[in-house]
Image (cartoon, helix red, strand yellow):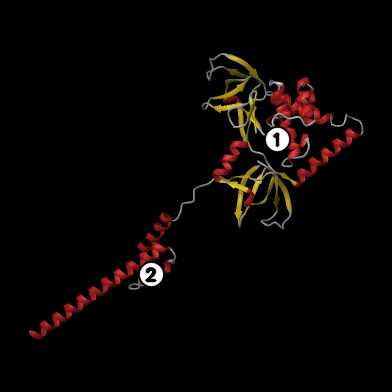
Amino acid sequence: MLKGRRIQILFAGLILCLGLSCMFYLDAEAASKKEYLDSLSVGITQIIDPTTGSTNEQAIQELTEMASTDSPQTAEESDLVMVNVQMAMNVRSEASEDSDKVGVLYKDCGGRILERRDGWTRLKSGDLIGWASDEYLLFGEDAEAMADDVGNLIVTIETEILRVRVEPNRNAEVVGLLTVDDELEIIEFINDDWISVNYEGETRYVSSEFVDVDFHIDEGETLVAIRKREEAERQAKLTANQGAVVVGGDDTRLLAALIQCEAGGETSNGKLAVGAVVMNRVRSGAYPNTISGVIFASGQFTPALNGKVARVYTSGNISESCYEAARAAINGETNVGDATHFRRAGNHDGLLIDHQVFW
């Protein structure tokens, strides 16, 4: 009996030792796994349970959950990209300064991200597709803020007659009528049915059912488009030099037409300010270096985009005051300093002249 009792005691002691060893082993293993999970620097194969030789599925799940919890979540960012330069930047065929130039992005241009790699972004801006250095680009909230600041709302009237009312109500008094040839300046979207607009210096309302609104950002130019534009300008100069028109007469008329569209109802100061903005862009080097190039560059002036400038230019229905402002601006006069932008007052800080602000 004594011998048997000793065996039982020894066996119990052995079990106790084995239990303590297992507890120590499990504690060590748990600490080891915690260290792995905390560092997130080990692979799945390193959390194999050595007692079974099988993958510890719970540890794998914990690792995955911890990785997704502790790692910063990448917010879904907009694919918008904006150019952040004072003049212009080149766009390349590949993500390298040594690759071929395929186009140019001017100041305030924007586009959509197609791919990002090694400090370069492949983007699409109008017809231009290529690689640009991230050093001169803005992304995310910064890009959206710039786009909101410099973008244009392009409005197309989709009915023969659009009624302008004093209140956002179909029974409200009609104070004016707009046609497809008229320019519509939006103030804000009231709701799904109505838009407030600037009509003769007053806030009025039109039905959103009969207009199409598109937010437009200036776009880059491909080398093909640049060569085509420059050749057209060269041909125009050749024609003028040959006596078909007075040298500079076409540009003066074109600038006067733009002033008519953008500030026809403003004072002489307001008209000169618009003309000065165009000429400041011509001189700045950040934009095309001709009046026609500036006016018809992608996204610069709403009346040029919707065809109104071309119609006014062709019709010749331009006031003498707009011609006077155009000639003065071409001769170097300015009342806005070196400002290169303007828009309706109230939406941007700057120099207020009549109903528009310049900066």
Residue 177 location (% of width, % of height): 64, 17
Q: Nearer the viewer, mark 2 or mark 1?
A: 1
**Residue 226 shows in the view:** yes
Task: Name the residue that disc number 2 marks.
Answer: 48
Do labels 2 and 1 touch, CB within 8 Å? no
**Residue closer to the observer: 159 or 83:** 83
Q: Quadrant of the C terminus?
A: top right
Left or right: 50 as drawn, with respect to 160 = left
**Residue closer to the observer: 279 or 73:** 279
Graded by Cα atoms within 10 Å as few (under 14), some (14 to 19) or many (20 or more), the crowding at tag 1 reads some
Name which residue lies at 29% across and 70% down: 26
Q: Name which quarter of the figure residue 255 lies in.
A: top right
Mark identifier at residue 167: none
The mark nearer the N terminus, 2 or 1, is 2
Three-letter code for the amino acid on which mark 2 is drawn: Ile
Mark identifier at residue 338: 1
